[in-house]
Amino acid sequence: MNVFTMNESENEIFRELISHFDSGLSLNFRPLNRSIESEWEPDYHLFLLDAGFANSEYLHERMNELRKRGAHDRHFLFVIKNKESISSQNLELVVDDLKTSLQTYLVDPVILTASINGQKAYVNDEPFEIWNHKTAEYQSFKKLKHLHQTDVIERYTGFKELIDFYQRFWRDAQPAFLWSSSDLTPFIYNELPAELIEALNSLKGIELLKIEDPEIFAAAVKDRHVLSVAYIPEEGGMGGTALHAKWVIREGEEEPMIKKPHHFVLSTSLYRKRNHPHHLLLTDPDVVVTDREGFPVPKTSVVNFKEEVIKMSGYRAFLTAVEEEIS
């Protein structure tokens, strides 16, 4: 991970504090006030920003450089490093202003607030006080530790939240957040029948990536560089997660009364019959051939039964939609 900050000594302090967590983080110092000279491989970028001038010209220069090099939306994390230097009300204003500014480059920038000085005091048992909103008083870390309220300290310093973010969305996540310079378009899914995975893998230009975690999937589908499909079995659902996916697939036999764009109904059980012998399909009661208006027509009129079954199963319509999107 590249860490952008104004001076290397601050980066060393940050590195030391991070080392107290079993995170597996590897940090590379990058001066925020210096141009990027080398061509980098895809990586993650953490910006440690001062609350007093978080939205600086240096930040915008580095963002422009990274975006030109193909850095991906989900490879950025911004941290206000000294939240103790301003009031909580002003901190909210700083975060809001920074987020608005960063939306020039990123769809949904992630901004955390932290206190390097607070974490340093916590680790080294040094004096440090914070305002406790519940008790409406200043409380020292020493007192909070005595009261077994270390969770209050950890929420304030922000380091645990930072590590949790790294582990959940970067270290342990499926490799869905690829750089836009990739030759293949990431195609993410939560669950799909094996038959559909095989069919999608036959298409050129996409890379299938499975993301089972609902929270990570919900974040990934908002990424403008990926295609996504949310699969809903006959019994079950994805909740609000499916709403943001590029396509939504529901397993079933009947088309809904009101059709929605990018929503498809598939019958995998029917699709599995595509290679059945012609004479079996002629007598199969589940194989009902219809015209464009949905009225039944004689099966004997079908020339290519395999293609007809693929079409009736809904697979053809969905695969065609994907092909049109990537072409």
Image (tube, rainbow, N blue to C red):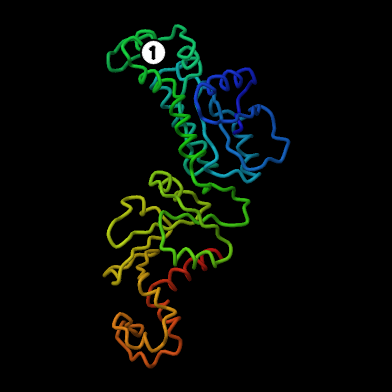
Q: Residue furthest right?
A: 37
The quadrant of the image that shows the C terminus is: bottom right
Position of residue 295 relative to residue 137, above or below, is below
- The residue carrying mark 1 is 130
x, y percentage for residue 317? 43, 72
Of residues 155 and 310, the one drawn nearer to the viewer in this rendering? 310
Q: What's the residue type where badge 1 is placed?
A: Ile
The residue lying at 49 percent from left, 10 percent from top is 124
x, y percentage for residue 21? 49, 24
The 10 Å Cα crowd at callout 1, few under 14, some 14 to 19, many 20 or more, is some
Position of residue 211 relative to residue 278, above or below, is above
Q: Left or right of 230: which side holds 12?
A: right
Q: Left or right of 57: which side holds 140?
A: left
Of residues 183 and 173, the one drawn nearer to the viewer in this rendering? 173
Of residues 72 and 20, the one drawn nearer to the viewer in this rendering? 20
Position of residue 243 relative to residue 111, above or below, is below
Q: Left or right of 232: which side holds 67?
A: right
The residue lying at 46 percent from left, 34 percent from top is 165
The quadrant of the image that shows the N terminus is: top right
Position of residue 196 relative to residue 173, above or below, is below
